[in-house]
Structures are given as structure tokens and as C-alpha cells.
Amino acid sequence: MRCPRCGCENLTREVYTLTNTDNKNYDVGSGICGAILFGWPGLLCGLFDSGSKTTTTTKIGYRCNDCGANLYS
């Protein structure tokens, strides 16, 4: 494998970990359901269902030791 920028073959293999967090807001459906079942305190039930979702992606790439270019596969 060659570097597309400088053409050298002096590459180092690296593993990259990318993390993405998707935060949810107040869930109105759960709040309404909680209000019907428990009254005003039940409106807080919408907060319990509003967690966050985290996804992690691992990519393997190469770094050129001569010019520093990153090559992702």
C-alpha cells in the first residue's frame, strides 16, 4: 500500500474509535400517559424515557510516517 500524497510505503496501521451520542428530549407521549395514570407527578414520567443513545464505530486506518497523511479504509 502506498500513500496517495507522497507515494511512500512507510505506513503505520491505526485503529480509530468514533463515539456518537444522540440525546433525546422530553417524551410527550410518556408524560401524557403518566399524567393519566398518576396525575401531575406523572408528567415527570416523560423525563424517565428521555435517555440518550450512544453508538460506537471502530475504523481501521493508516498514517503515512513521512508526510503524516491519514488513510481510512
Image (spheres, grey):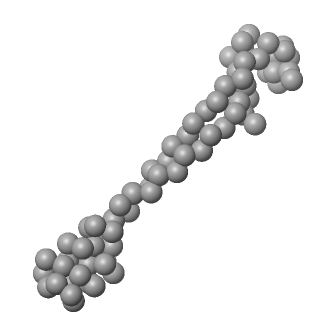
Residue 69 visible in the shown view? no
The image position of residue 65, as x and y in percent, is 72, 12
Count numbered badges in the picture.
0
Residue furthest to the bottom in view is 36
Query: Which quadrant is home to the N terminus?
Result: top right
The image position of residue 59, as x and y in percent, is 66, 38
Relative horizontal placement of residue 24, taking residue 42 as reference (left or right): right
Residue 23 visible in the shown view? yes
The image position of residue 70, as x and y in percent, is 69, 26
- The quarter holding residue 30 reads bottom left
Relative horizontal placement of residue 51, taking residue 66 as reference (left or right): left
The image position of residue 66, as x and y in percent, is 74, 10
Q: In the rendered image of this protein, does residue 44 appear above or below residue 2?
A: below
Q: Residue at x 70, y 33 (%)?
A: 60
Q: In the rendered image of this protein, does residue 18 appear above or below residue 14?
A: below
Q: In the rendered image of this protein, does residue 36 appear above or below residue 21?
A: below
Residue furthest to the left in view is 40
Relative horizontal placement of residue 14, taking residue 40 as reference (left or right): right
Out of 72 and 56, give the one closest to the viewer: 56
Q: Residue at x 21, y 89 (%)?
A: 36
Residue furthest to the front in view is 37
Relative horizontal placement of residue 55, taking residue 16 as reference (left or right): left
Q: Residue at x 55, y 40 (%)?
A: 18
Query: Which quadrant is home to the C terminus?
Result: top right
